Image (cartoon, rainbow, N blue to C red):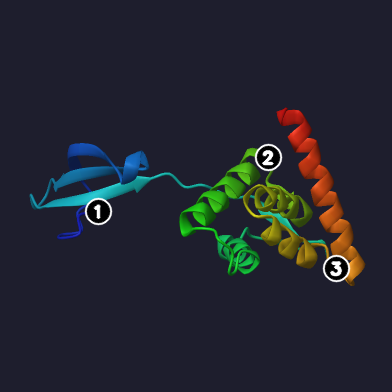
């Protein structure tokens, strides 16, 4: 690690501690050349898979795009920011756990729909209407019927 004071290449670690709830390591360092002390933070890098769009193009996973989609579906719904952040993290975790370098956008959409179904049914239908490109009221009706059937099946399994 280069010293920020004299730009020397060598430094020694004096102290290491966990930071950011265990997601980072805080290291206190001392420059071998000038003796100045400085702090560095080390964290892991999570690499998300690339997204294969329906037209076949590849693009990097875009967390901001996912967040916007969720926020749009959840607009004016009784859901806290903490719940949204938890769902966002859960979706990303599920995508990473697929273990693929490339994931089809359709798969990501299905994961998002599962998460929204569990969180808020109105947001689920809103997202589905855009994701599945509903063209008429009948498409909404079919989606709501499917949602109700799915909910009934879940209730049967809970009994």
Tag 3 secondary structure = loop
Q: Earlier in the sequence, mark 2 or mark 1?
A: 1
- Residue 33, x across and y down, in percent: 11, 50
Q: In whole angstroms, how far apart are the C-alphas of marks 3 and 1? A: 56 Å
Of 58 and 18, the residue lying toward us: 18
Disc 3 packing (10 Å; few <14; some 14–19; many ≥20) = some
Tag 2 secondary structure = loop
109 up-or-down from 95: above or below: below
Q: Where, by quadrant of the figure, is residue 141 drawn?
A: bottom right
Of 108 and 140, the residue lying toward us: 140
> Seen in the image, is 32 located left or right of residue 152?
left
Q: Nearer the viewer, mark 2 or mark 1?
A: 2
Tag 1 secondary structure = loop
What residue lies at 74% left-to-right and 36% top-to-bottom? 155
Residue behind mark 2: 98
Residue behind mark 1: 2
Q: In whole angstroms, how far apart are the C-alphas of marks 3 and 2? A: 28 Å
Q: Where, by quadrant of the figure, is residue 106 drawn?
A: bottom right
Instruction: Work out which quarter of the rendered image holds the C terminus and state it.
Output: top right
Residue behind mark 3: 134
């Amino acid at each position: 690690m280069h010293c920020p004071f004299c730009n020397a290449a060598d430094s020694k670690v004096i102290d290491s501690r966990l930071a950011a709830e265990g997601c980072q390591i805080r290291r206190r360092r001392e420059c071998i050349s000038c003796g100045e002390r400085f702090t560095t933070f080390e964290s892991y890098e999570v690499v998300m898979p690339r997204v294969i769009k329906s037209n076949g193009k590849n693009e990097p996973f875009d967390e901001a795009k996912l967040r916007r989609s969720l926020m749009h579906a959840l607009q004016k719904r009784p859901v806290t920011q903490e719940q949204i952040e938890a769902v966002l993290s859960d979706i990303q975790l599920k995508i990473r756990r697929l273990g693929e370098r490339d994931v089809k956008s359709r798969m990501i959409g299905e994961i998002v729909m599962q998460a929204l179904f569990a969180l808020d049914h109105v947001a689920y239908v809103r997202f589905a209407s855009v994701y599945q490109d509903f063209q008429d009221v009948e498409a909404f009706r079919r989606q709501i019927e499917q949602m109700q059937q799915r909910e009934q099946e879940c209730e049967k399994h809970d009994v």
